[in-house]
Image (cartoon, rainbow, N blue to C red):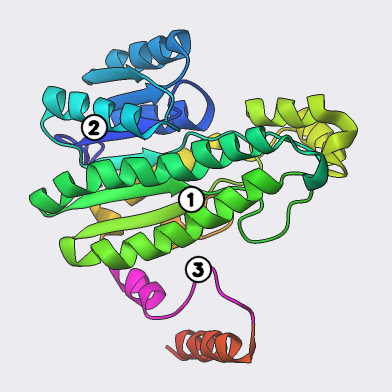
Amino acid sequence: MSTLHLSGRVALVTGSGRGIGRAIALKLAAAGSDLILVARTAVELDESARQVRDLGRNCFVAQADVSHREAVDQLVLQALSEFKRIDILVNNAGVQSPIGPLIENDPDEWVRTVSTNLFATFYFMRAVAPGMIAQGRGKIINLSGGGATAPRPNFSAYAASKAAIVRLTETAAEELKRHNIQVNAIAPGAINTRMLDEVLQAGQAAGEEAVDALKRKQQGGMSIESVAELAVFLAGHASDGLTGKLISAPHDAWREWNGERIEDLMSAPWLTLRRMDSFSMRQLQEERERCESQ
């Protein structure tokens, strides 16, 4: 694969002022993509933009609250005026508060988290997809997170929104695949970002997760590089045909996937949200046996 295999592409990355969002933006820039950086904090955005430009890429910066639909629509129009196209959308912006038992959560804060995590993802997909349809191709990458596939006590707003993002990803993938637009979700794993510090600050309200967070703080979390590299894989031609999947950056063997393996993945309900029952398990077992016999 060419080092600059995304040359000529334009990528919009939300929450790109720091953490995972900045890491993804820089990897996309290193692969040749120009960037539209979106976040709430100007000083962090400016630093991300500086690093993108140091890599020789053009950059458009938009400071915005992504939970407001009007702000999303406006910044997408401005970005299109600047670059004329958006080829890649990475919905990374997210928050995890309130932390604590659901019955003790501030309802307004709960709704704000769902708005930032889930509604913003929908707003950006809705704003960007028409242009992708018109140009006959596109890549949409949504960030999932803890609680999407298993309960996450004391993080109900975050968990519910991240699970919804996966089903939104699967549904949009079906709607958009006839337009050559692939939509996938990334499970980043336990990474040491500012969210980890929020868990530590929450203390007992975070329950057992506070103990795990302290251990991760001391020992180090999973690689943020693997998340950024997976995003670049999903943004490029190597992942063509792969859509509607939830892919674990640290645990799935995505670096080994070629066209044949992608066809296998798309022929069965792998890497999706499914109810675990006899019907689903039989399908999975039959697929496993078929793969092992080849």
Q: Amino acid at mark 3?
A: Thr
Horizontal relation, residue 142 to residue 78: left or right: right
Residue, x 51% and y 32% (percent of image)? 20
Q: Is residue 96 above or below residue 141?
A: above
Classify the position of the C terminus by image quarter.
Answer: bottom left
Residue nearest the viewer, comparing 279 with 294 = 279
Res 202 → quadrant: top right
Magenta stretch bounds: 258-276
Packing grade of label 3 (10 A; few <14, some 14-19, many >=20) is: some
Q: Nearer the viewer, residue 280 or 175?
A: 175
Q: Which label's residue is closer to the chain start, 2 or 3?
A: 2
Position of 170 relative to 15 (above/below): below
User: Which percent across, then down, holds residue 274?
Assistant: 56, 74
Residue at the disc numbered 2: 33
C-beta proximity under 8 Å, tags 2 and 3? no
Give the residue at mark 3.
272
